[in-house]
Image (spheres, grey):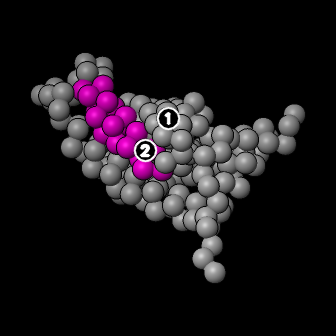
Amino acid sequence: MKKSHVLKMVTMAFMIAVGVVISPILRIEGMCPMSSLINITCAVLFGPWYALGCAVIIGIIRMTLMGIPPLALTGAVFGAALSGILYRISNGKLIFAVLGEVIGTGIIGAVVSYPIMTFLWGRAGLTWIFYIPMFTGATLMGGAIALLFLTALQRGGTLIKMQKSLGAKIYARPAKVNL
C-alpha cells in the first residue's frame, strides 16, 4: 500500500472525526456552518468524490449518534461534491470551492430537503423555500471560515505541501515572498 494512500485515509478519518465533533458548534436545526468548513476543506484537499464520501459518513454518524434529522445528509452532500467540482474547474481558485458549497448546500441541498423532511420525516406546513435562508446563511458563515483558513494555508505554502502529500491534484501556487 502506498504511503500517500495510507496518509489520505488517516487524514480522511481525522476530517470525519473533526466534522462530527465540531458540528454542534453554532448549530441550530437547518444551520450547521462547521459542516461547510469541513466540506470545503475536504474538497480542496482531496477532491469532490472524497469530499462527498466524507460528508456522507459524517451525516450518517450525526444522524445515528446525535439524532440529527436527514438534513445532516441533504444539507451536506451536494455542497461537498459541487465544492470540489468547481474548485477543479476553476483550476484551484478557493473562492469557487466556497461558491460550490453555497450553491450545492445553500440552494440545491435546501430544496432537496423539503420533500424529505415533509414526506419522509413528517414535518407538515413547510414550503420548498423554507430551508434556503438557513442553509445559505450557514454556508456563508462556514465558507468564510474555510476561505480564511485555506487562504492562510495557501499563503504559507502549506496547502500545496498538504495536497502533494495526500496525492491530490495540485492547483495552488506557492506564495511569493517579498524581500
Q: Secondary structure at mark 2?
A: helix
Residue depicted at 67% across the width and 48% down the height? 163
Residue depicted at 52% across the width and 52% down the height? 21
Report whether residue 76 is seen.
no
Give the mark count: 2
Report whether residue 47 is seen.
yes
- Residue 178 lies in the magenta-colored region: no
- Residue 101 lies in the magenta-colored region: yes
The residue at which mark 1 appears reads as 89
Whether residue 59 is situated above or below residue 142 in the rendered picture: above
| Quadrant the N terminus occupies | top right
Residue depicted at 26% across the width and 28% down the height? 111
Residue 53 placement: quadrant? top right
Residue 77 placement: quadrant? top left
Q: Nearer the viewer, residue 86 or 140?
A: 86
Q: Report the amino acid beneath label 1.
A: Ile
Mark 1–mark 2 contact, CB under 8 Å?
Answer: yes
The residue at which mark 2 appears reads as 96
Whether residue 179 is situated above or below residue 158 in the rendered picture: below
Q: Report the amino acid beneath label 2.
A: Phe
Residue depicted at 53% across the width and 58% down the height? 150
Q: Residue 54: x, y in percent? A: 56, 37
Q: Residue 55: x, y in percent? A: 51, 36
CA gap between label 1 and label 2 equals 9 Å
Please, which residue is most extreme toward the left here? 125
Magenta segment boundaries in residue numbering = 94-114
